[in-house]
Image: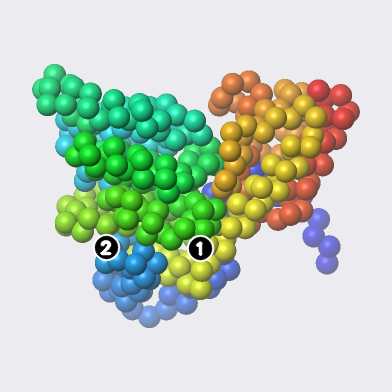
Amino acid sequence: MTDTRPLPRVFSSDNTAGTSPEIADAVARAVTGPALPYGADAVTGRVRDRLREIFETDVDVLIVSTGTAANVLSLAALTPPWGSVLCHRDSHINNDECGAPEFYTAGAKLVPLDGRDAKIDPDLLRTAVRHKTGDVHSVEPSVVSVTQATETGAVLTPDELGTLATITRDAGLRLHMDGARFAGAVAALGRTPADLTWRAGVDLLSFGATKNGTMTADAIVVFDRALTPELSFRAKRAGQIAAKNRFHAAQLDAYLTDGLWLRNAAHANSMAARLRHGLNAVPGVEPLGTTDANILFCRLPQPVIEKLLADGFVFYHDRWEPGVVRLVTSFATTEDDVDDLLRAVGDATATGSR
Ligand SMILES: Cc1ncc(COP(=O)(O)O)c(C=O)c1O
């Protein structure tokens, strides 16, 4: 039977994708029979073991239901209430978490710093880590938070991460990584998860998975295991220790099996690369910044934006300067989806929507 449904023309976020079949199957298998609650089940243990293997060290793991929870619980464990979190101005924690970092840290201050491609500029960080330290009239620089891959789709190279980590460590601060798209960074860089985290000095990683295949499960990967007891109490107080945690664990278990997490991310990245390549060839369209992972920013003539929206494409277009749009691919994006969008952009520019 012919499928007459409209094409899925959604490029607003990778969290619009469904789930990988392997993950849906794993959840279905977890449906029957008893299992111990609150993370004491066998599958949660297996997820921890898989992450220990992947990160080549004895990590602890807290499974949570959102990336925001992973970020804010991590930050709360790394800063006192009178501390500050040094982050990029465009970071998710600074813009998109409704004050949860401030709330969960009991009032620590976010200090936004600039830098290209949503990467903190090392010179600005060097100044910020020393700013008014030990001065009771100011907040105390306590933790640096970097995002990998960044909010604009670039990745921090090991050298860039190393530089930021050295500045952080030399000043006695802690290092958090928002890895909502960590898989995309690993796939793009071809470096080991260990090199991109604890070997560089990362204390806590928000290990994102919902954007790349799971339904409702992300995790905090704890490299500094002395933080685990405090994090566990904080997770419970935040309602982030699920009684039926086994269903979250089943998702992550399948996600981490046979490299599914990296296959999904590599696919999402390659769809963004295809999109960027195609957009480069369209007159009047200007791809912006660097697209290493699965987020692409570009400038489009306003009439072209209007036409795409009228044609049913969904994407963010009114959050930045006029004409700047964000296009995001996912593990579920197909070549046909990308080519459909490219065709529509080409048509709209050619027919004078310019
Ligand atoms: C960089 C980044 N961090 C964290 C998150 C986590 O968000 P959520 O709480 O919606 O899972 C997102 C989601 O958009 C993100 O883009």
Q: Which residue is mark 2?
A: 60
Q: Amino acid at mark 1?
A: Trp
In the rendered view, tell whether residue 36 sits above or below residue 82: below
Q: Which residue is found at the position 58% from the left and 68% from the top?
A: 21
Residue 343 appears at what percent x and percent y?
Answer: 82, 42
Quadrant of the image for the C terminus? top right
Residue 18 at least partly seen = no
**Horizontal side, residue 213 vs residue 31: left or right:** right
**Circle 2 sits in a helix, a strand or a loop, which is it?**
strand
Residue 347 vs residue 266, the one in the foreground: 266
Quadrant of the image for the N terminus? bottom right
Q: Amino acid at mark 2?
A: Asp
Q: CA distance from mark 2 to mark 1?
A: 19 Å
Q: Which residue is found at the position 22% from the left and 31% from the top?
A: 141
In the rendered view, tell whether residue 19 sits above or below residue 280: below
Q: Which residue is mark 1?
A: 261
Q: Which residue is found at the position 53% from the left and 67% from the top?
A: 260
Q: Is mark 1 within 8 Å of ligand 1?
A: no
Residue 19 appears at what percent x and percent y?
Answer: 55, 61
Q: How many marks?
A: 2
Q: Is mark 2 within 8 Å of ligand 1?
A: no
> Which badge, 2 or 1, comes first in the chain's sequence?
2
Residue 77 at least partly seen = yes
Residue 114 vs residue 331, the one in the foreground: 114
